Amino acid sequence: MPIWFAYTLIALLVITSILLTLLILLHRGKGGGLSSMFGGGVSSSLAGSSVAEKNLDRYTVLVGIVWFACIVGLGLWLRLQLNSAGA
């Protein structure tokens, strides 16, 4: 495989890593962790999840899947490069 494939995956990996970090930080704390230590557990939640929270969950899962696919793709690319260099 060409080297541009690896560079594309690395760029996508960096972008999705930053996005995943930001999306996870946007989630509201459920209590009982570090978020409750800093006063996050005091807020009362309304009856059920809002549409914005559900969409945030969906985006987080989608970005996580893309991030995981980049990791697997880079691993496979590296294995192919090492096998072709050793043969």
Image: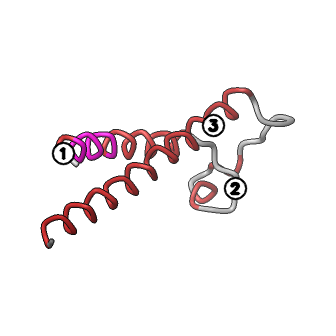
Q: Give me the C-alpha separation between circle 2 and circle 1.
A: 47 Å
Q: How is the image coloured?
A: secondary structure
- The x and y percentages for residue 24 are 52, 45
Identity of the residue drawn at 33% across and 39% down: 15
Residue that protrudes farthest toward the front in the picture: 87
Q: Give me the C-alpha separation between circle 2 and circle 3.
A: 21 Å
- The x and y percentages for residue 56 are 61, 34
Identity of the residue drawn at 39% across and 41% down: 16
Mainly helix, strand or loop, the magenta region? helix
Which is more toward the observer, 60 or 38? 60
Instruction: Check disc 2 and give the amino acid type.
Output: Gly
Specify whether 31 is left or right of 35.
right
| Magenta stretch encompasses residue 12 | yes
**On screen, residue 9 above or below 76:** above
* Range shown magenta: 5-13
Say which mark, if any, is on residue 31: 2
- The x and y percentages for residue 53 are 68, 34
- Disc nearest the viewer among 1 and 3: 1
**On screen, residue 15 above or below 87:** above
Q: Quadrant of the C terminus?
A: bottom left
Instruction: Check disc 1 and give the amino acid type.
Output: Pro
Question: Mark 1 = which residue?
Answer: 2
Identity of the residue drawn at 58% across and 44% down: 61
- The x and y percentages for residue 22 are 45, 40
* Image quadrant where residue 55 sits: top right
Which is more toward the observer, 31 or 61? 61
Instruction: Check disc 3 and give the amino acid type.
Output: Arg
Q: Give me the C-alpha separation between circle 1 and circle 3.
A: 33 Å
Say which mark, if any, is on residue 38: none
Question: Mark 3 = which residue?
Answer: 58
